[in-house]
Amino acid sequence: MKKIDIARTWGVALIVGVAAGFVIANQIHVASDVKIGTVSGDLIPTKDNVFTLGTSENRWKGLQLGPGTLFIEDNQTGKQAGLTVSKGALLINGINSIKIGETQLTAAGLLFPDGTVQKTATLVGATGKTGPAGPAGPAGEKGATGMSGGPQGFTGATGATGPSGTSGYDAKAVCVVTGTSAMYFGTCSELKQVGINLTVLIK
């Protein structure tokens, strides 16, 4: 096969093994059956920040990098940020925070969109909805017998002896009519009289 040195638009020293045709313009288009050989030097474009390696329609499948640094320029400050890996840890030098959506990981802690900063590893979230009630647990053991009732109260004092009864006599209501002093058996109200009600004992 014939080897061709390509050094036009890109100004890049490429050794291309040609198995089919190719077109050189602002980009290099290589047919699917063209095999590109190895590059023995640095691959440097002729202009800064102009050319692209691949497009959104035609992408490279993989990018293999050695133990070096991938540099990306800050589009605001123009400073370089270096991406490296050391002992299993991903290192990003030249930045002061990592932003995912509206949340930022900074040196002060995790910065949320509302301005709050989480400085510790734990953060109490909002209380979730109450879940359904679980099944009833087994009955507990029978508790110990409680103390017996209080002490016995004091014996009350003996009451006074009542009056003697009217054994052998019948009590009868008597009405003494006012003004005449007449006595009638029955109450004054029953007899429809005005007087004094008395009780007499009759044997």
Image (spheres, helix red, strand yellow):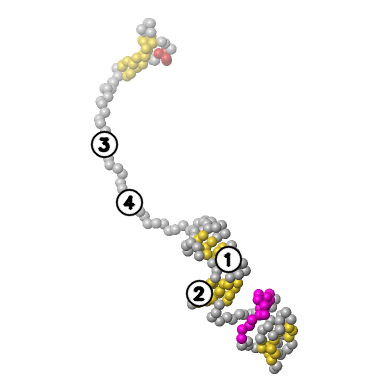
Q: Which residue is mark 4?
A: 145
In the image, residue 64 lies at what x, y percent? 59, 81
Of labels 1 and 3, the one closer to you: 1
43 vs 24, left or right, is left
Question: Local crowd at mark 4 within 10 Å, few (<14), some, or many (≥20)?
Answer: few
The label on residue 100 is 1
Question: Local crowd at mark 2 within 10 Å, few (<14), some, or many (≥20)?
Answer: few
Q: Is residue 76 above or below residue 51?
A: above
Asked where in the image residue 192 lies, by quadrant, the reply is: top left
Say if the magenta span includes residue 101: no
Check disc 3 and give the amino acid type: Phe
Q: Mark 2 vs mark 1: which is more N-terminal?
A: 2
Separation of disc 4 and disc 2 at Cα?
65 Å
The label on residue 63 is none
Magenta extent: 41-56
Front-most of residues 136 and 48: 48
Q: Is residue 154 above or below residue 97?
A: above
Separation of disc 2 and disc 1 at Cα?
19 Å
66 vs 14, left or right, is left
Residue 131 seen by the camera: no
In the image, residue 115 lies at what x, y percent? 55, 58
Separation of disc 1 and disc 4 at Cα?
64 Å
Check disc 1 and give the amino acid type: Ile
Q: Which residue is mark 2?
A: 89
* Total residue callouts: 4
Give the quadrant of the C terminus. top left
